[in-house]
Amino acid sequence: MAEHEQVHEHVRVAVIGSGFGGLGAAVRLRREGITDFVVLERSGSVGGTWRDNSYPGCACDVPSHLYSFSFAPNPEWPRTFSGQEHIRAYLEHVTDTFGLRPHLRFDSEVKRMAWDTERLRWEIETVRGTLTADVVVSATGPLSDPKVPDIPGLDTFPGKVFHSARWDHDYDLTGKRVAMIGTGASAIQIVPAVQPKVGRLTLFQRTPAWVMPRVDRAISGAERALHRAVPATTKLRRGLLWGIRELQVQAFTKHPDELGFVERIARRNMGAAIKDPALRAKLTPDYRIGCKRILLSSTYYPALAKPNVDVVASGLSEVRGTTLVAADGTEAEADAIIFGTGFHVTDMPIAERVVGADGRTLAETWKGGMEALRGGTAAGFPNFMTVIGPNTGLGNSSMILMIESQLNYMADYLRQLNVLGGRTALDPRPAAVRNWNHRVQERMKRTVWNTGGCTSWYLDASGRNTTVWPGTTAEFRRATRRVDLAEYQVLRPAPAQIGAKAADADTGANTGADTGTNAGTNAGADAEVSA
């Protein structure tokens, strides 16, 4: 039987997704001695966003040695900033090195999962069948479901349309009139990659981005040999990269005015390539650098200065046949439309498929904004954890650092369940979740993401920043080093199920009285988030 056709009726842990978060969770489970788990993957291979995003020029904007697991250093990174193909190969290598393939269930998209309040387990329905799990770890990530704006007339466009994360490699752009919609991290890589081959490229820019030079180079054979021979040098390199970024955090979170120096570097980067004053005016942001993610490229501005490129300083508002109309009335003809318009970050589709203890979906619970205790657990959803959950994103460093911190929390969560014994579940106390998120939002008020004068994908529909972590990665590591049972209710089977005598002996039945009071919960959350 093929590995992805094997079905488990019940597992201790079900992990959803096989990107960095899901594979990291799988490795950590095995290191904790837990082998009764599956990784449910909707696609046919591992890699997550680094499998889905294969557009021309796709690469990471975090240095290679920092954008990798601490427990799986890679001395063979070919460049200081690695391309998509190298990162995907790294994830395949991690999968094989740590023996994860027997746990993978490919082509197994989760359609629905619901908490069984009587049996204290999750019932999971996938496109390939059903299973149950004591614990679910959702590692679908915020960059997994592309967002395409609802543009009037788009459905009647006679040419080719695709999102950057669903690149059509069979479509030849050579000589075509191509419209690029968006100016985010994907667009600034796509534009210089396709500009030399297209007939005409029209960039629809709703908001210009701050772009810093990308100091990328090949890592020499001597460097790689040194890292192979002396592994400590790889660790040292990673530590230096981490330390530099930790020092930068205060400018983003407490003293945005200090970013003026960085802004001047970005202006010089633009000025070196863009000589036309009118074009330079179009490309100059009117918000503080850092409010949106700072982009890295040394080829984006030179590409925009080429004679076959037009920049429309307005978003796309309507499609009339092959004519694209911007909000300011500018028109352009196109044979193909490429959307670089990001992902469903603050409204992740997986939340619509998760049904909690009260019968509501996670999306309904998060209708007023995403909230999770320490970025990982949501009240009313026992034994359910998210990796890269609310307010765990970063504006200047590697998300792998945050993922590993959340995996520490996951490991202790499972240890606590084992210590409690029997059929047990942990449900975050609403007061603990509220208190944690109140503290996070209070800290958020002075950050550049909230005060910089922009509208970014960090903000939800109500303007609340539910995406970024307002502190250092070290602070988050401390906040997630262990599970504080005072922040949880301990759930056990109802007396009718386990017998009256057993219920009498069970001090932690559904009341959760053995986990401490709400006052204790609040104190614990205060101490961590204000570190």
Image (cartoon, grey):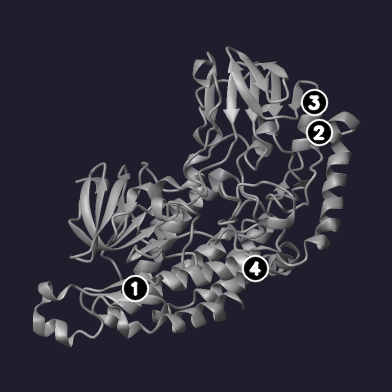
Q: Which residue is mark 4?
A: 443
Q: Position of residue 297 (x, y in %)?
A: 73, 43
Alpha-carbon distance for marks 1 and 2?
53 Å
Q: Secondary structure at mark 1?
A: helix
Q: Are marks 1 and 3 in contact (CB under 8 Å)?
A: no
The answer to whether one can see residue 408 in this image is no
Assess disc 3: are there few (<14), some (14-19) or many (≥20) residues with their C-alpha within 10 Å of its C-alpha: some
**Side of 29 where 162 appears, left or right:** right
Mark 3 and mark 2 lie on one chain; the one further toward the N terminus is 2
Question: Which residue is drawn at the image coordinates 45% and 67% (left, top)?
Answer: 407
Q: Secondary structure at mark 2?
A: helix
Alpha-carbon distance for marks 3 and 2?
15 Å
Determine the image quadrant of residue 65. Answer: bottom right
Mark 1 and mark 3 lie on one chain; the one further toward the N terminus is 3
Mark 4 and mark 3 lie on one chain; the one further toward the N terminus is 3
Mark 1 and mark 4 lie on one chain; the one further toward the N terminus is 1
Q: Secondary structure at mark 3?
A: loop
Q: Amino acid at mark 2?
A: Lys
Q: Amino acid at mark 4?
A: Arg
With respect to residue 186, does 388 lie above or below?
below
Q: Are marks 1 and 2 in contact (CB under 8 Å)?
A: no
Name the foreground residue: 405 vs 104: 405
Q: Position of residue 337 (x, y in %)?
A: 59, 23
Q: Which residue is mark 3?
A: 306
Q: Amino acid at mark 3?
A: Lys
Alpha-carbon distance for marks 1 and 4?
30 Å
